[in-house]
Amino acid sequence: MDAKGNGYVRAPALRRPVVSTSSNDPFRSVLRHRQFLIFLASSTAGNVGYAVYAISIPWLTYSVSHSYAVVGAALFIELASYACVFLVGPIVDRTSNQRSIFLACYPPMAVAVSAIGLGAARGFLTVPLLLALVAVVSILWDFVWAADNAAPGILLTTDQQFAAQGITGAVGSTNAIAGYAAGGALIFVVGPSGGLYLYAILLVAGALLALPLRIIPPPHEPESFAESFREGWRFVASGPGRPFLQLGSIDGVQGFFLAAPALYITLFAETTFHASAFAYSLLFVCEVVGGAAAGWAFGRWNPRSRVGPLLGLTLVCASAAVALSAGAPAWLALEAGAFFAIGFAWSSYTDVKYAFLRGAIPPGQLARGTSNLWLFPGVTSSAGALVLGSLATSGDPRLFGGVLGAGLLAAGLLAFAMPAVRSMKY
């Protein structure tokens, strides 16, 4: 943000030389970049698998434990592990070839999720074993997530980043729809163990696809882990009004409810629709389709000069969509539409936020910048998973929806109240 509060001004940083691309078709040079396409293929395998995992694990946890508190505990472990991603960013930024991150993480993740699926199917999966394996998968996913964020900034030139973001956004939306749809179908047909087996297969495929990758950061002065760590936090705390820290505080409020959609859908399917696996799968997929629609809409609109107001507006709209779902009659088609709206509004906030971060943070600090900022929602989301899991034991989706809607409204109003956030643009 400049001295007049007119928007964030990117800090000076060393970048790769700018190479012009065709103004008529900005996507062509990106789609011709062999290394980027290999990265995209490997990342797609892992992300489709993660979508299958995300829809399968709450239902599998409930099937094993018959306890919403245990579902909340599993989500707590997952989100608490993600909160530690700020420790991973300096390691990823300092890795000589970031291909090694994928090769080191995907295979053990495949073993862990296979053990979850096999244990649930054979009946030897205990709650402690399930939670321990969820922790292993989540910690390894921290490394993958940080490397996924950093790779496009390393592989491509500066003026290719917007086209790359458009391509990865479109592929990501397709991944989410395909993964959640496949996971939902497997839950309905063979049970949640099927989703875990599919995730393991996709992780192995992602590792094999990563073998020819060369994701080599630009040369930089040697620095220790501690120096790299401190530099990342200095950047987050920089700028007049400290806009990143203000954004982090909003993320902290919104992040408290990060586990809420999965719990909310599970609660609806169990109580309102009589433990229907079909209802659970349909509501989950509708929420994700709504999120994909938001990504397409914002990609076409590209509201770079309206980031600040949109952060608040999307949270207020998410609150309204939750209120619609909680107050609507118990008709599956009507609730499917309400969860589509929840997914659209919820994902709109995330899309606007990450578009801003990737446009404002220099590529050489992107893994650290995004990982450090994740600390705010990471901490609150882990606590929220426990609190919301306990709240879900009431068995009342209307009460749960009321709390969720009120929290999102509070986050939206906080965004409107913060001047450094209101004026964000890039």
Image (tube, rainbow, N blue to C red):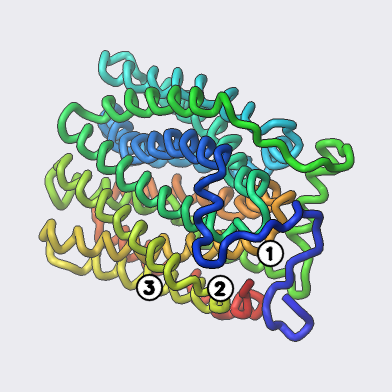
- Residue 376 in the figure: left or right of residue 47: right
Residue that numbered label 1 is attached to? 245
Q: Give how far across and how far down residue 90 sits, in percent.
A: 74, 40
The residue to which callout 2 is attached is 304
Residue 124, above or below 381: above
Q: Amino acid at mark 1?
A: Leu
Residue 91 at x, y percent in the picture: 72, 35
**Which residue in the protein does label 3 denote?**
317
Quadrant of the image for the C terminus? Answer: bottom right
Q: Amino acid at mark 2?
A: Arg
Q: Earlier in the sequence, mark 3 or mark 1?
A: 1
Instruction: Report, in whole angstroms, how far the alpha carbon at label 3 lies from the one at label 1.
Output: 23 Å
Instruction: Please identify, in this view, whether the residue under mark 1 or under mark 2 is nearer the observer.
Output: 2
Count of numbered tags: 3
Disc 1 element: helix
Q: Is residue 81 visible?
A: no
From the image, state whether disc 3 or disc 2 is nearer to you: 2
Circle 2 SS class: helix
Mark 2 is surrounded, within 10 Å at the Cα level, by few (under 14), some (14 to 19) or many (20 or more) other residues, namely some
